Image (spheres, rainbow, N blue to C red):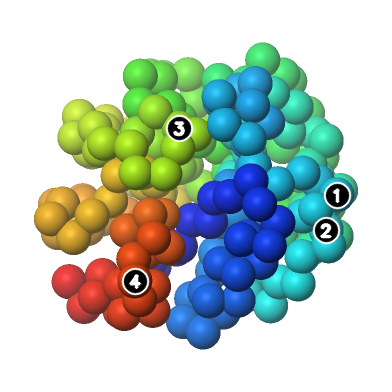
Amino acid sequence: MIVPALLSQDKEKMQEMLNVCSNFADLVQIDIMDGKFVPSQSITAQELVRLKISTPNELHLMVNDPFAWLEPASQIGSKRIIFHLETEIDHKKLITEIKKMEMEAGVSLNPKTNIEKLKPIIKDIDLILFMAVNPGFYGAPFIPEVLDKIKKFKKVWPNKKTAIDGGVKENNFSKIKNIGLNYICIGSAILKSKDPKQAFLNFSRL
């Protein structure tokens, strides 16, 4: 499944992106950034809950305190919370809290993070999101070595759902698609194109 990844600090722009994607997407990923875990900032929790969201959504939390976003995620009906393995928190406690709120728990790995670090929580995780860029910005360059990491992961945990996020373009999409991911998250190549729906359809046909 192709999942548009929505990233903006401006509430009106985020609402515009949501409105556009509601015409073609089955799932959208809303990127949340706190300006601490990553240099950039996104909309606030207060702005998030005021958005009108008709498309099924998940939150990708690039923040130091994922716990603070659980209630807002529940309020907007998020199906899944994706937090970063690099956050210095009690990951097992976070997963428990996410599942108490009847959402799926996903974990994201930055490009340099070793998959071995997933072992303590892997059995409780519903999705692993592999970052193919250093997170926080639209349009960052794709890091191809991440594909080798995904292949290694799939040999060890073949039944776990996997996704990739960052730097996906038409010129590298086939190579990415061929490694057997469940979800491919695409940001600027869809949302910054002149015709986001057509861009989405183009990827769907590749």
Q: Nearer the viewer, mark 1 or mark 3?
A: 1
Tell me, for residue 194, which label it has, or none: 4
Instruction: Please provide percent x and percent y for residue 16.
Output: 60, 70
Residue plotted at (70% across, 46% down): 43
Front residue (pair 170, 112): 170
7 in relation to 20, above or below: above
Residue plotted at (35% across, 76% down): 195
Residue 41 visible in the current orientation: yes
Residue holding disc 3: 135
Alpha carbons under labels 4 and 3: distance apart: 24 Å
Residue 28 occupies quadrant: bottom right
Q: Amino acid type of disc 3? A: Pro
Q: Residues within 10 Å of mark 2 (few under 14, many from 20)?
A: some
Alpha carbons under labels 1 and 4: distance apart: 30 Å
Q: Amino acid type of disc 1? A: Gln
Residue 188 occupies quadrant: bottom left
Alpha carbons under labels 1 and 2: distance apart: 6 Å
Tell me the quarter of the image containing the C terminus: bottom left
Q: Amino acid type of disc 4? A: Lys
Check whether the beta carbons of the residues at disc 4 and disc 3 lie within 8 A of each other.
Answer: no
Q: Residues within 10 Å of mark 4 (few under 14, many from 20)?
A: few
Whichever of labels 2 and 3 marks the residue nearer the N terminus, that label is 2
Alpha carbons under labels 2 and 4: distance apart: 28 Å
Residue holding disc 1: 46
Q: Amino acid type of disc 2? A: Val
Dot 4: what SS? loop
Alpha carbons under labels 1 and 3: distance apart: 23 Å
Check whether the beta carbons of the residues at disc 1 and disc 2 lie within 8 A of each other.
Answer: yes
Residue plotted at (56% across, 67% down): 17
Whichever of labels 2 and 4 marks the residue nearer the N terminus, that label is 2
Residue holding disc 2: 49
Whichever of labels 4 and 3 marks the residue nearer the N terminus, that label is 3
